[in-house]
Image: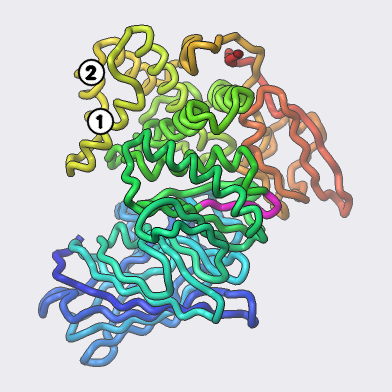
Amino acid sequence: MQQGYSQSAEINLKFRYGNEVNPIGIDVEYILSADFSNSTERLVFLYDRMYPLQRSSDTVSNLQVKDRLGVFPLKLLPNDKLDGSGYLRWSALRAQDGPVTVSYFVPLAPPLALKSGPVKDLQAAGDGISGALGSFLLFPDQSKKININLHWILNNGQDAVCSQGVGKNISFQTSLDDLFEIQFLAGSLYAYANNKITAGFNMYGLGQEVNDELNTSADWYSKAYEIIRDSLNGSPTVPFYYFFRSYNGNPMSSGRAGSGSFLLYLPKKISMNDEDIRILSAHEMIHVFVSDLVDPDDLTDWYIEGIADYLSVKLLYDGHLIDVKKYLEEINGQAAVYYTNKLRSIPNQKIPETMWSGTNAWTTPYSRGAMYFADLEGKLKQHRAKVTVLSLVNVLNAMKKRGEKISSESWVNLLEKEVGAWALADYETMLSGKLLIPGDNAFGESFKRKPVKASFFDLGFDYPKSIKAGEHIKNLRANSPAAKAGLKEGDIINSDVDLFPLYKSYSKFLTIDVRRNGKIISIRYHPRSTSASAYKWIF
């Protein structure tokens, strides 16, 4: 980032409507203070490329930039493939002279993203809009804290909330990186808000008629928040925001956590009280309280995603918010995801290049990390160690709060100091991709491990997370279960299918409705091939 000063920005945001009800995007206008650059610096404006979602129609248009001298000329820099920043960049052609006024329009992103990725794109839900500020913000690159005054121009009855506070007009100080990650909802909000605005648990949503359901479900979510917060040494005096948005998009629910909040995508017709939505929400809550390990090569998903998968189930079970039946269903679902993944033995260093390559590749670090932490917990008990997985994670969190940089090396040093050589060896085994087989006690002293008959997941054609209506079957593999069941290359998918429940099962069948020559054909098959060693736990 460039050298900065005590900069401030007045940001005004207004919905643009295609009709009187449905928003089609956001009109943005903001004024930068005169000290964003000095007399010789030239500002560089950044626009998040939204990797791996990829932008398509949600690009900047009608861009106008002015300062005291008039038009403030910008040039879109060529896409540098060596630039790992993930931003499109506009460079000023001269130095800033006085306050700078920037205005432009950003339309909504398509409801079905080009690729799977985090929930931060600009989406309409109900009569409102949601996402992360980085989904529409074109903003100067600089290094110091920025004073932000955020103003929403909304219709009567509408309101706004973001991870920095509630209301149409809020002020806060932040860094550029954090500014882009701030999550928001604006429109006719559904709300379950704490009476103390500056503390406690709050839920806000858009796009689903859930007012009655929200009030009944919020009690459970509030309890889950308190268990997770207290287990991970979070502060009860800091506000926590659970945001959700619902629209006709991907059939698979997903979420993204940020500082003090997370945003959940809730597909239409799925209840807030659905147990799988509760588990996913707990996963995202844990992200809010667990600091990620710094790694420029993105090799630490085993930690941040693995610990969220592991603790989301364990903490809810230990806190009596799920029963033993659901607990077994979840840990055995994690086991099925891990043991039936063809990439289960890929070395950790190769995961980033395969993460979004297709089928269930994206699950690799999640399930591997969860099994690693379960295995570690069981062995810590066997060795009568004075620490637990949870206490080790809390040590790293405390280091981060003190301003220390935490990385994979921090985890290694912690294992060496608090546990011993066997834990270091197990860590290296996990990174190498060697199959993990947690012991009987990995998920609790009352549980036992047993081998099961299983086969690797084999969809038979290319898809990363879910099967989307209107798209074509492509790269169908000959002699695959799908081909043998009658699926053909070029068949048009007639209805969405969420694949995640299939990943979590050793035996579920897949049914796909396709259109072929004007007819709807239902194809049912077992999406698995080639035997795989696998295990489950029983009570």
The quarter of the displayed image where residue 23 is located: bottom right
Q: Left or right: 141 with respect to 446?
A: left
Residue visible at 60% across and 60% down in the picture? 111
Marker disc for residue 343: none
Q: Left or right: 215 with respect to 154?
A: right
Residue visible at 19% across and 74% down in the picture? 36
Judge the density around disc 1: few (<14), some (14-19), many (≥20) Cα neighbours within 10 Å. Answer: some
Q: Left or right: 490 with respect to 97?
A: right
Which three-letter amino acid code belongs to the residue tagged 2? Glu
Residue at numbered disc 1: 395
Which three-letter amino acid code belongs to the residue tagged 1? Val
Colour scheme of this structure image? rainbow
The quarter of the displayed image where residue 278 is located: top right
Q: Is residue 333 visible?
A: no
In this orientation, which residue lies closer to the viewer: 506 or 89?
Answer: 506
Image coordinates of residue 65 in percent, x first then y, are 32, 83
Q: What separation in Å lies between label 1 and label 2 (alpha carbons)?
A: 11 Å
Marker disc for residue 418: 2
Image coordinates of residue 135 in percent, x first then y, are 44, 64
Residue 466 in magenta stretch:
no
Image coordinates of residue 423 in percent, x first then y, are 30, 15
Q: Is residue 323 visible?
A: yes
In this orientation, which residue lies closer to the viewer: 141 or 146?
Answer: 146
Q: Which residues are magenta?
A: 264-270
Residue visible at 58% across and 28% down in the picture? 330
**387 above or below 240?**
above
Seen as rendered, the residue at the extreme front is 195
Task: Tell me the SS state at disc 2.
Answer: helix
The answer to which of marks 1 and 2 sits earlier in the sequence is 1
Prevailing secondary structure of the magenta residues: loop
